[in-house]
Image (cartoon, helix red, strand yellow):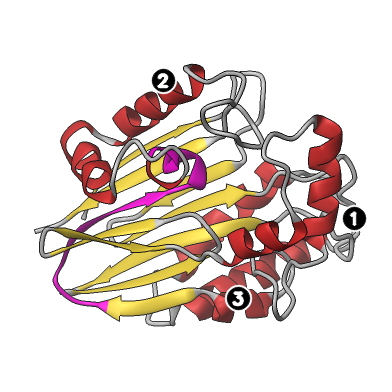
Amino acid sequence: MRVELASEPISRIRDNLDWAGATPTTAVVLDGLTEGPATGCTHGTAWYVGQLGTRLLAYANSDRELAECLAEAITAVSALHEDTCDLSHPGTPCTTVTMIRRRGRLTDYLVLADSPLVLDIGGTPEVVIDEAEKAVSARIGRPPNTTPEQLKEFIAQQQKHRNVDGGYWVAQVHPEAGYHALRATVDDVRGAVLASDGAALLVTDFGLWGWDQFLQTAYADGPQAVIDETRRAEASDPDRVRWPRAKVSDDATAIVCRWS
């Protein structure tokens, strides 16, 4: 498997809450959720995604199902800071998970929450994305352009629907989250693009590209080209008029995988 990776924070003075990594057979993208000022954790989201991501890559180097690998990784990271942090706090760090694993001609995938996976199946993009968080946000009424105070209140409301039946699931402290992910094993996959939601905005929120253009641009020009085009679009709408959204920019990460 040939892999190309790019990741970029909102700004140089902010931690990147995304994480990405790969081995010759596995690729993982994590998108740590933005939280309010109180989290109960002394480490932070950037630390959490780094710890979880490295374990996911290690555990996936086995015959175990990806859901089991994720459950074990969540348990292991929780054990690292359960004595120093309040893991019962609703704002304790959490993340989306998107991963693939190549086994001969077969490709296993797992998608937890809204970071998309674009599979190239016979030259046609097949998109796997969990829309549960979007449904929850619609129910509780996300303001189109939030002020910092509105965003804080929205996050507090959103946390009540996290990792519960009827809500949406992310990797946090509950190992069973892995079994709520979208997952399957597929054949005839030529390649894939894994992305955080901040690297998929051209399709999902801005409507400037379709998934075919997203896939072909990532193939031809690499993941950084996708991020650069996203940044140009964000910069063209600094007041969030054309595309109402919670933040002007978001962390953006993408991995392009190709195999013969």
Q: Nearer the N terminus, badge 3 or badge 1?
A: 3
Q: Nearer the N terminus, badge 3 or badge 2?
A: 3
Quarter of the image where the C terminus is located: bottom left
Q: Given this view, does label 3 or label 1 mark the residue nearer the observer?
A: 3
Q: Residue 157 at x, y = what percent?
A: 83, 57
- Picture quarter containing residue 124? bottom left
Give the alpha-carbon distance from disc 1 to disc 2, as whole Å: 41 Å
Q: Residue 39 at x, y = what percent?
A: 86, 49
What residue sits 72% from the left and 72% below the top? 163
What residue sits 53% from the left and 45% below the top? 19
Give the alpha-carbon distance from disc 3 to disc 1, as whole Å: 21 Å
Q: Report the magenta residues as a range.
A: 186-202
**SS of the residue under disc 2:** helix
Q: Mark 2 points at which residue?
A: 232
**Residue 47 magenta-highlighted:** no
Relative vertical location of residue 182 with respect to residue 235 in this rendering, above or below: below
Q: Which amino acid does label 3 sit on?
A: Ala
Give the alpha-carbon distance from disc 3 to disc 2, as whole Å: 38 Å
- Picture quarter containing residue 249? top right
Label count reads 3
- Is residue 157 rendered to the left or right of residue 34? right
Q: Mark 3 points at which residue?
A: 71
Q: Residues within 10 Å of mark 1 (few under 14, many from 20)?
A: few
**Residue 195 magenta-highlighted:** yes
Relative vertical location of residue 199 with respect to residue 162 in this rendering, above or below: above
**SS of the residue under disc 3:** helix
65 or 250: nearer the eye? 250
Q: Residue 97 at x, y = what percent?
A: 52, 60
